[in-house]
Each structure stands twice: as C-alpha cells, then as structure tokens.
Image (cartoon, rainbow, N blue to C red):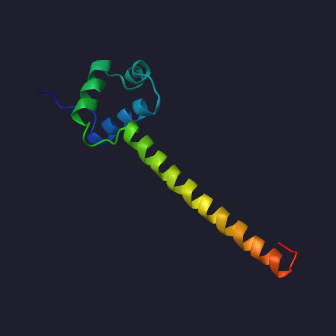
Amino acid sequence: MAKSRFNKDQIMAVIHEVDAGLTLKDASKKYEVSEKTIYRWRLKLANKIPRMKDRLQSLETENQRLKRKFAELSLDYTSLRAALIREGTKEC
C-alpha cells in the first residue's frame, strides 16, 4: 500500500471543510484527490470526528438550557421589581 501524502490532521481538516459546507467536488479539486478518497477518509475516521448532527444536537440542548435559565431570571426580576414598587420606591 502506498504512503499517503496527507497526515491525519490534514485529512481531518479536509473532512471538516466538507462537513462545514464545501462541496465534495470542490474539495477534491482543491486538495487534488478523488471524491472516492474523501469518502474513504470519512469512513475510516468516522469514529474520531464528531458529526455535524451530534454538534447540532448539543447546541440545541444548550439553547434549551439557556432559554430556561433566561425565563427563570426574567421571573425573578419581575417579582423583585413588583416587590420594590409595593414598598413605595417607584424607581426601578
């Protein structure tokens, strides 16, 4: 088997570019490898590269957590503001 002219970091960079939106055709021209080679790299390193779907899922989970925290803080602010107004200080 011939030695690859790309090391693992370079291969992972190519795959990340393709996952980020660069078309397979453009990536193959840019790095002067065949589309089949990029597919093979992707299969070979599939376990080592987090997929965009997994990344999206983690971002959606984080977004939901932040929304809940924001709602909680908004409720706290509203209740504290109402308490201050009831005490007679009209400045908030």
Image height check: is 63 above or below 70?
above
Residue toward you, 88 or 55? 88
Name the image quarter holding residue 13. Answer: top left
Residue 16 place in picture, x, y as percent: 39, 36
Which residue appears farthest toward the left when viewing the image? Answer: 1
Query: Residue at 37% across / 42% down in the picture?
Result: 54
Residue 24 place in picture, x, y as percent: 39, 22
Q: Is residue 16 left or right of residue 83?
A: left
Query: Residue at 40% across / 37% down in the picture?
Result: 52
Name the image quarter holding residue 88. Answer: bottom right
Which residue appears farthest toward the front when viewing the image? Answer: 86
Q: Is residue 34 visible?
A: no
Residue 1 place in picture, x, y as percent: 11, 27
Q: Is residue 37 left or right of residue 62?
A: left
Query: Residue at 45% across / 49% down in the picture?
Result: 61
Q: Where's the C terminus, which quadrant? A: bottom right
Residue 59 place in picture, x, y as percent: 47, 47
Image height check: is 24 above or below 85?
above
Query: Residue at 77% across / 71% down in the picture?
Result: 82
Image height check: is 24 above or below 48?
above
